[in-house]
Image (tube, rainbow, N blue to C red):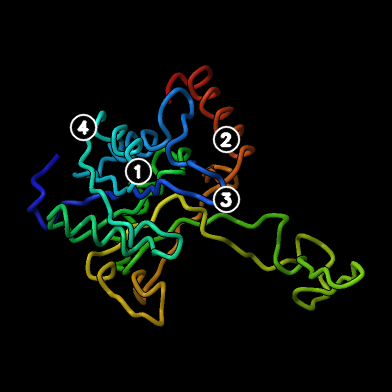
Amino acid sequence: MTQTDDVNSITAVIVGRRGSKGFPNKNSRVLGGRPMVVHSIEQARQAACIDHVIVSTDGEEIAAAARAEGVEVIMRPPSLASDEASVDSAVRHAIESSGVASRRVVILYANVPIRPRDLIDDAVQHLEKTGADSVQSYESVGKHHPWWMVRVGENDSISAWHQNDVYRRQDLPPAYFPDGGVIALTRESLFTVEPDAPHAFLGRDRRAIVNAIGSVIDIDDEIDMLVAEAIIKRRETVEGGP
């Protein structure tokens, strides 16, 4: 790890709140025999580009797990841990509280334990190569294409979400969604705050890195937990490592 006052260093901030309405306590659950946040910590440490790792949380269990790994923990105030608080505000708080001078920052979600092994390095390299403000990972929507979505109204009536005459999957235009795997961005972009533009922190020049379908697992329910457990077990037994 390099000194945190080095502007050329790269800091990874892992964000994980204590609460979650959709899937309670998801960031403090145990997965594959380890606390959820530890998976992201290990992945950040395995990335060749990362010089410093910070965990931002309001949860004591998450903080304890991170400290046990020797990682710096920034406890966020309640105002940055509510359902309405933005991720970027928590990351800015972590960077300012830590005092790191890094000009490039990587954001990782604590509830994403499964990522492609080189994803973090690939995102940072793409950021540097393109000179973009941010690089975010995406995944193809596959068969769940928005053109085939519908609205269900009164008496179970159906209306198209988007009018079109496409019947073959092959004819659908490519569409992608942010998979939660990684966000790499410049410090200048991160600290751009516009109240009426919630994604202003991603900057004007936003680039994508596309992951294979299913290569990132974002834990939001019990099914995601089962899938992640199965992938971890396969990696340990078949590939010989976490």
Task: Tell me the quarter of the picture where residue 196 sits.
Answer: bottom left
Q: Nearer the viewer, residue 21 or 181?
A: 21
Q: Is residue 228 above or below residue 107?
A: above
Query: Can you give x and y, in whole percent of width and height, for residue 237 in the image?
Result: 52, 17
Q: Earlier in the sequence, mark 3 or mark 4?
A: 3
Q: CA distance from mark 3 to mark 2?
A: 14 Å
225 in relation to 49, above or below: above
Task: Tell which circle, 4 or 1, labels the residue nearer the N-terminal end.
Answer: 1
Q: Which residue is mark 3?
A: 22
User: What type is the residue that disc 3 sits on?
Assistant: Gly
- Tell me the number on the disc at residue 70: 4
**Residue 134 placed where, x, y %?**
35, 65
In the orientation shown, which residue stands out farthest toward the bottom? 196
- Name the secondary structure under disc 3: loop
| Residue at the (43%, 37%) spot, across then down | 28
Kindly identify which residue carries mark 1. 59
Report the amino acid beneath label 1: Gly
> CA separation, marks 1 and 2?
20 Å
Q: Nearer the viewer, mark 1 or mark 2?
A: 1
The image shows residue 176 at horizontal and vertical percentages of 58, 62
Q: Do callouts 4 and 2 mark residues in contact (Cβ within 8 Å)?
A: no
